[in-house]
């Protein structure tokens, strides 16, 4: 039977990792498939659903009401409500929501001009 080797200081500094404990870093290839709709969001709601957050996005489409100002005002009063169409529902962890808010805030505080894309060809 072989004698056990006494652990060296290097052994104590480098804990053994099982294959399940190894962390790998991979790059992300962001996919944007054709046909995914782009929606305009005018309203949103955030709900807590432990341990996650539900982000719901809506679009309100202004109704077309034509005519003199007094007619338009009366027509709007008669509507009673306006529909908010459900656009998307996203569920995220608290960590991801905080990261999203941090990144969004960073973009909003930038002084750089927007990137314009010529779509006329």
Image: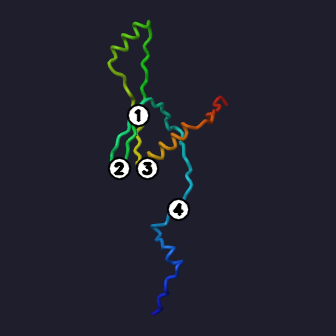
Q: Which mark is residue 24?
A: 4
Classify 10 Å Cα crowding around label 1: few (below 14), some (14-19), many (20 and above). Answer: some
Against 89, residue 119 (above or below) is: above
Query: 108 or 84, which lies in front?
Result: 108
Image point 47% across, 91% down: which residue?
Answer: 3
Coordinates of residue 107 in the picture (x, y in percent): 55, 39
Q: Which comes before the other along the chain, label 3 or label 2?
A: 2
Q: Earlier in the sequence, mark 4 or mark 3?
A: 4
**Residue 109 versus residue 27 in the image, above or below:** above
Q: Nearer the viewer, mark 2 or mark 4?
A: 2
Mark 1 or 2 closer to N-term?
1
Quarter of the view holding residue 48: top left
Which residue is painted at 32% across and 18% down in the image? 80
Cα separation between marks 2 and 4: 26 Å
For label 2, the residue is 51
Q: Which of label 1 and label 3 is nearer to you?
A: 3
Question: Which residue has dot 1 on it?
Answer: 44
Q: Secondary structure at mark 1?
A: strand
Q: Is residue 40 above or below residue 30?
A: above
x, y (%) of residue 25?
54, 59
Q: Residue 74 has which mark?
A: none
Badge 2 marks a residue whose secondary structure is: loop
Q: Residue at x 48, y 30 (%)?
A: 40
Which image quadrant: the N terminus? bottom left
Q: Which residue is mark 3?
A: 95
């Amino acid at each position: 039977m072989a004698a056990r080797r006494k652990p060296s200081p290097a052994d104590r500094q480098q804990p053994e990792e099982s294959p399940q404990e190894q962390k790998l870093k991979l790059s992300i290839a962001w996919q944007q498939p054709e046909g995914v709709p782009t929606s305009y969001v005018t309203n949103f709601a955030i709900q807590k659903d432990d341990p996650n957050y539900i982000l719901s996005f809506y679009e309100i489409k202004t109704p077309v009401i034509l005519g003199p100002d007094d007619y338009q005002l009366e027509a709007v009063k008669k509507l009673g409500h306006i529909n908010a169409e459900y656009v998307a529902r996203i569920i995220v962890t608290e960590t991801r929501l905080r990261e999203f808010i941090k990144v969004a805030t960073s973009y909003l505080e930038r002084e750089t001009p927007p990137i314009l894309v010529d779509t006329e060809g």
